[in-house]
Image (cartoon, rainbow, N blue to C red):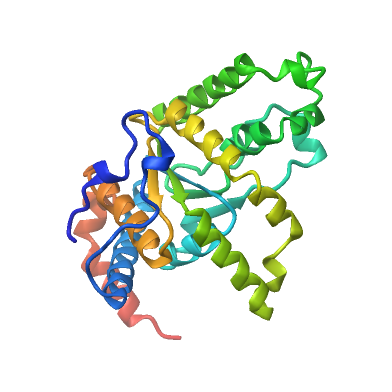
């Protein structure tokens, strides 16, 4: 498992989600998968330190998926070994009144990671072409100049949104942001089982909402919206990866390994060297500290 074949996950041509697997046979034990994840996230954490010191790239990781796909636990487990000063997680909820008064990308733009840092979007700017496509009535809340009724939310409207997203991602990529977009591809049956577990385990009850069942009835509409979004916006500088998500441990390892394999190809990311003057005086500095008395 030293090298994953990215062509199994990276989207470089048009796809149909129904033809993409929701599980990925690792052909090794569950314990081995967990150990691989542990080793990979340690190496990712060390690479993050170099990125922080290097300071010329930012990394944006976008995680999307249906309810119960494992977004929260994915973030917790994959980035466990990161230095907290170098990573910021944003979980985008329903837009606030202030956010609705701005263009739909505004709240995402101001949350972008600075160079030297990782930014993780738990749900992302794609909510604006996913949830709103399934529930176009939400668009009316933004009070847009050219949208006065649901009839105004047509294919031209959605293509303009996709164009805005493509331009947004191209712009930040050209300015040093490395973009990864992961869709956690869950089967409908696995979602059913996970919702049942939420109901059966008292400590998980708080995660459940009756709205989950209402949204589940719109499964096909969401799958269609995801398919269009992925096909419209997977580019070489901002690729989508479809991650089989029925098994959480496997999904976490795949995300961690893809990140590590791609990021370590940036050979210019190294800790900056000390100036020659400091190098020449290292022994002197050590002696000063050794002689210091408290």
Residue 160's quadrant in the figure?
top right
Q: Quadrant of the N terminus?
A: bottom left
Q: Position of residue 150 (x, y in %)?
A: 77, 22
- Residue 55's x, y, as percent? 39, 45
Residue located 34% across and 47% down the image = 54
Residue at the extreme bottom: 294
Q: Nearer the viewer, residue 101 or 116?
A: 101
Looking at the image, is 279 positioned above or below residue 179? below
Question: Could you tell me residue 153's position as x and y percent?
Answer: 70, 20
Q: How many marks?
A: 0
- The vertical placement of 292 against 91, above or below, is below
- Looking at the picture, tell me which residue is in the foreground, 53 or 244: 244
User: Which residue is rendered at x = 33% and y = 51% of the image?
Assistant: 259
Q: Is residue 148 above or below residue 59?
A: above
User: What's the residue at 37%, 43% (across, down)?
Assistant: 241
Vertical side of 272 occupied by 198: above or below: below
Residue drawn at (59%, 72%) of the image: 197
Relative side of 64 to 15, left or right: right
User: Where, by quadrant of the figure, is residue 293 drawn?
Assistant: bottom left
For the question of whether residue 126 can be seen, the reply is yes
- Image-based side of 210 in relation to 226, left or right: right
Residue 269 visible within the image: no
């Amino acid at each position: 498992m030293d090298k994953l074949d990215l062509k199994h996950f990276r989207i470089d041509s048009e796809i149909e989600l129904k033809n993409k697997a929701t599980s990925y046979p690792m052909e090794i034990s569950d314990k081995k998968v967990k150990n691989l994840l542990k080793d990979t996230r340690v190496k990712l954490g060390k690479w993050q330190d170099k990125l922080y010191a290097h300071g010329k790239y930012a990394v944006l990781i976008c995680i999307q998926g249906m309810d119960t796909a494992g977004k929260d636990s994915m973030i917790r487990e994959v980035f466990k070994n990161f230095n907290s000063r170098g990573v910021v997680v944003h979980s985008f909820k329903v837009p606030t009144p202030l956010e609705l008064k701005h263009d739909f990308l505004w709240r995402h733009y101001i949350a972008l990671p600075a160079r030297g840092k990782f930014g993780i979007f738990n749900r992302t700017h794609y909510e604006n072409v996913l949830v709103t496509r399934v529930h176009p009535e939400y668009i009316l809340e933004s009070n847009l100049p050219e949208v006065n009724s649901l009839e105004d939310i047509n294919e031209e409207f959605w293509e303009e949104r996709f164009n805005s997203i493509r331009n947004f991602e191209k712009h930040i990529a050209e300015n040093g942001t490395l973009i990864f977009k992961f869709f956690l591809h869950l089967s409908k049956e696995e979602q059913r089982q996970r919702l049942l577990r939420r109901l059966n385990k008292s400590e998980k009850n708080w995660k459940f909402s009756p709205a989950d069942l209402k949204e589940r009835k719109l499964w096909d509409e969401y799958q269609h919206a995801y398919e269009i979004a992925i096909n419209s916006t997977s580019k070489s500088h901002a690729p989508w990866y479809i991650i089989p998500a029925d098994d959480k441990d496997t999904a976490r390892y795949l995300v961690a390994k893809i990140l590590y394999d791609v990021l370590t190809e940036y050979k210019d990311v190294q800790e900056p060297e000390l100036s020659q003057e400091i190098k020449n005086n290292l022994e002197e500095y050590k002696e000063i500290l050794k002689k210091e008395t408290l």
